[in-house]
Amino acid sequence: MISKDHKLPLTRQANLLELSRSSLYYEPVPVSEHDLMLMRLIDEIHLKLPDFGSRRIQDELEDLGHRIGRDHIRTLMRKMGIEAVYQKPRTSKPHPGHKIYPYLLRNKEVTHANHVWAADITYLPMARGFCYLVAIMAWHSRRVLAWRLSNTLDVSFCIEALEEALEKFGPPEIFNSDQGSQFTSEAFTKVLISNNVKISMDGKGRWIDNVFIERLWRSVKYEEVYLKAYGGVAEARRELTAYFERYNMRRRHQGIGRRTPDSVYWATLPGQRIAV
């Protein structure tokens, strides 16, 4: 979303998006082939065993024949944007100064399309690098409404996905996410507030509150990403476009009566608003 041709100075654009000014000029250092291999293994371990922290992931890697220091594992996990998920006695703020909204879905029955949307970010390995994927999902139908890829974890690609979903499908009643800094940022939440959407946030580490989108990541990776070695972001975008089309239109889910996300979404959408 940052544009050098925009009438606003780059510094002002960065401030509005809550990005570091230095990040506009940062040249990323290539990740070594060895670290990319380790990150792929860590991603697979985390997907299967999301409650494992760096110590237990270290044990798993050692069982696979890789003796890696725990500090290095922590560094790679931070780069990937993942951490162990478990119920913690106290919720900590993900970013100083960001407002944390209460969780609104406890004991709530989600009954129709656009009742609740959920969002999350995941790490995607590629043949010679990695990127991040954000998806906006309609909770009741499991339909993926919009998604974006990025090679950084700044908020702009999350906002682009959200704005596309709002433009195509109208606003939901409730938007639920974790407390990641992208979703708690003012730049992101003001888009929801301006559309009169109630904001709900999980407790830190409570993956069960966003379980449907966590299952989406498992499907995306085992049915698509791990079977291919994307040569770059352009290829990943092309292949994921085809995958999400199949996912929405053809993939049947046991949790919604063996129906497809598309069929459930449009059947339960008040007013039958048509996407463009």
Image: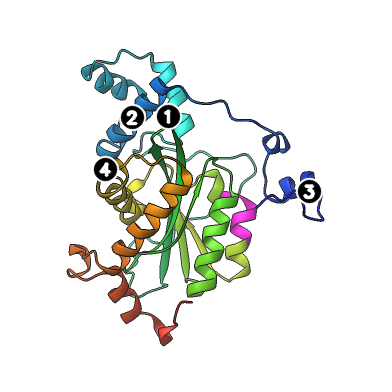
Q: CA distance from mark 1 to mark 3?
A: 31 Å
| Residue 221 horizontal side relative to residue 181, left or right | left
Q: Where is residue 71, by image quadrant?
A: top left
Q: How is the image coloured?
A: rainbow
User: Residue at (60%, 51%) from the top-left corner?
Assistant: 156
Q: Are marks 2 and 1 in contact (CB under 8 Å)?
A: yes
Q: Of marks 1 and 4, which one's residue comes earlier in the chain?
A: 1
The residue carrying mark 4 is: 227
* Magenta highlight range: 184-190
Amino acid type at image mark 4: Leu
**Which SS type dominates the magenta stretch?**
helix
User: Residue at (48%, 31%) from the top-left corner?
Assistant: 79
Q: Of marks 2 and 1, which one's residue comes earlier in the chain?
A: 2
User: Residue at (78%, 44%) from the top-left corner?
Assistant: 11
The residue carrying mark 2 is: 42
The residue carrying mark 1 is: 77
Amino acid type at image mark 2: Ile
In the drawing, what numbered circle is on residue 12? 3
Q: Is residue 89 above or below residue 268?
A: above
